[in-house]
Amino acid sequence: MTYTQEWPIETMQEQYEPPLLEIVDLRVWYGAATALKGVDFIVERGEVVVIIGSNGAGQTTIMKTISGVVELRKTVEGQVLFYGTDIAGQQTHKIQQLGISHVPEGRRIFPESTVEENLMLGAYTRFKRERGAIAGDLDAIFDRFPVLGERRKRPAGYLSGGEQQMLAIGRALMSRPFLLLLDEPSLGLAPLIVADVFEIIKELAAGGTTILLVEQMANMALEIADRAYVLETGEITLEGTGAQLLEDPRVKEAYLGA
Amino acid sequence: MGDLVQILIATATTGSTIALIALGINIVFATTRVVNFAQGGIVVAAGYIAFVFSSPAHVGMNVWLAFGLTTLAGILLGIFVDLWGVSALGGYDRNENRSWLIITLSVAALALFWLLIPSSTFTKILAMVAVAGIIVGVAYGIARPSPLGKFDPATNVGWIITTFALGMFFIPNIVTRAISNSPEKIPELVGGKAITIAGQAITPSDLLIVGMSIALLVAIELVMSRTMLGRAFHAVSQDPTTASLMGINTGSIVIIAFGLAGALGAIASVLIAPKLFVKLDNSITLSIWALVAVVLGGLGSTKGAVVGAYLVALITAAVTTLAPDGDKWAQPVLFLGLLVILRVRPTGLFGRVAVEKV
């Protein structure tokens, strides 16, 4: 998907490919409380971009604003450019249909639906046009997460926390997104399971999925990041490659416990 | 023997009708957590609408055609209740102010009745619309958005007043003023000879009620358990925000739920008309039966609603037939039964305690 920028001088006409996701001066308030004070960042195709920060710095607000989740007394200013088109303020289901899949904080699987139904719901918008491809995708998910295959007919509420996280990621992948938003995938999981989850994210990244990851496990997140941002009380205070931030003394002190 | 057959016939026919109405309440509850008290009002309104369409004194069309059009009217009434009584209180997924919706609909209703109603009764109608408007306005005023920023029936209780006012007073009163104030009859959908068993007649209408209700119940259950639309319904009922992250338009799912409930109410109304007549009291009777059925079976459970409906019909028919002065005792016994069952199983017969979200 490319679009041609018309320059005034014909000879300067060129193909311009906007970044997959570009956040421009994003400001969000909840009533009188400011959550984001003007955030700018970019996610290019194929990248893993990580936003680290302490609890309540505004990461989840960024994620919910990108995917259009409306909350009480929330005011949004600024732009969320997806392929160069401003999608801020659009309805959540329409944003999902553009190819943004959001794995929400706390996983939010449908506990009373079976594992398979959860995954099928991930492919809800593809069902009309690409019905034939869905069965294959379902098998691919079960290949990648065998534990989900074993429990496909069980209500998802009976899965363990780690299995639910796999399900939430699998469900998001069923829509074949252009951009995967992962909000705190390690939240509430045992260390061993967290390592599994990061292994999966690494695999997805290697397979070419573009990922925006919000994480408090700064160490592990920065290791898999192509680029990373540090968010502090609604502002981006540092940015760089994952390796750069891992070495940064301020990051070490505040987030890596060194 | 004759008594037993009579009880069975009454249970099968009334029970099937209650099951359709109860299922409508259930579908709306599952998707919105709102108990739609307006369902009984829709049933009565649909009865009078079917009367206008089929009666030779009015439109006088073919009774099956009237049946179809009434079902359509039921869908519209269901959506009307959603827009005016529930969505107007704040919407499901957004926090936008919907007062414009109430104002627009009120003006539209006023204009419509100005055209429809003879001038002598207009002042009455005006007063009624004004009262309903005030009720809706008060409900809207006390309704406050939930901390989650979406419509939350638990904290935003305006729907209790709005659906009750619309269903018990507004819709049935408008319809009875506009059409008729007395009990009316709708021609039966099927004619033919009755079968007699132990001195009790089973008419083709009776068989139609049971057959069509069961076919509808099975069809809806299949749609809910086998299709993508059904899965979307379950998703919205569990977690509307996450459902919208799946690309599901939660607003239209809710509209479909209310429309489907309205259609089921209208179908039930026309089917039971040969037995009950079309009259204003049905609004309360059928509402109570259907609500008891739903609570008895367990709110949100389809199986529960159906079993509850037949149980309500069985208790009512048995007490009415067997006890002296039975029709006076039917409702007290019914409520006693409800109390006993809720004491033993607080979530109803098939109600589940929600699976804990980890």
Image (tube, coloured by chain):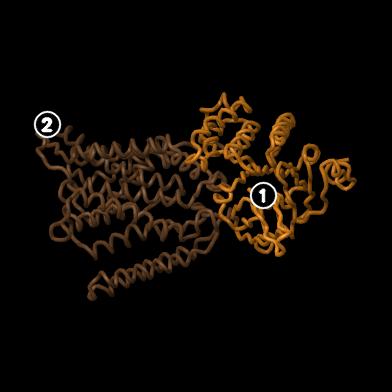
Chain colours: A orange, B brown
Judging from the image, mark 1 belongs to the subunit labelled: A
Residue A148, x across and y down, in percent:
59, 28
Rendering coords of residue B121 (x, y %): 24, 73
Q: Secondary structure at mark 1?
A: helix
Does dot 2 land on a helix, a strand or a loop?
A: strand
Do marks 1 and 2 share a subunit?
Answer: no
- Above or below A105: residue B177: below
Residue A76 point in image, percent of width and height: 65, 60
Q: Where is residue B219 drawn, in percent x and y?
A: 34, 37
Between B266 and B131, the one nearer to me in the picture: B266
The type of residue carrying mark 1 is: Met
| CB contact under 8 Å: marks 1 and 2 | no
Which sits in the foreground, B279 or A168? A168
Specify whether residue B341 is in view.
no
* Residue found at x 15% / y 42%: B190
Label 2 crowd (10 A; few <14 / some 14-19 / many >=20): few
Tell me the residue at 31%/60% (across/down).
Answer: B171
Q: Which residue is mark 1?
A: A63
Q: Which residue is mark 2?
A: B197
On the rendered structure, is B262 left or right of A109? left
As shown in the figure, which amino acid type bears the numbered disc 2?
Ile
| Residue occupying image coordinates x 37% and y 42% | B294
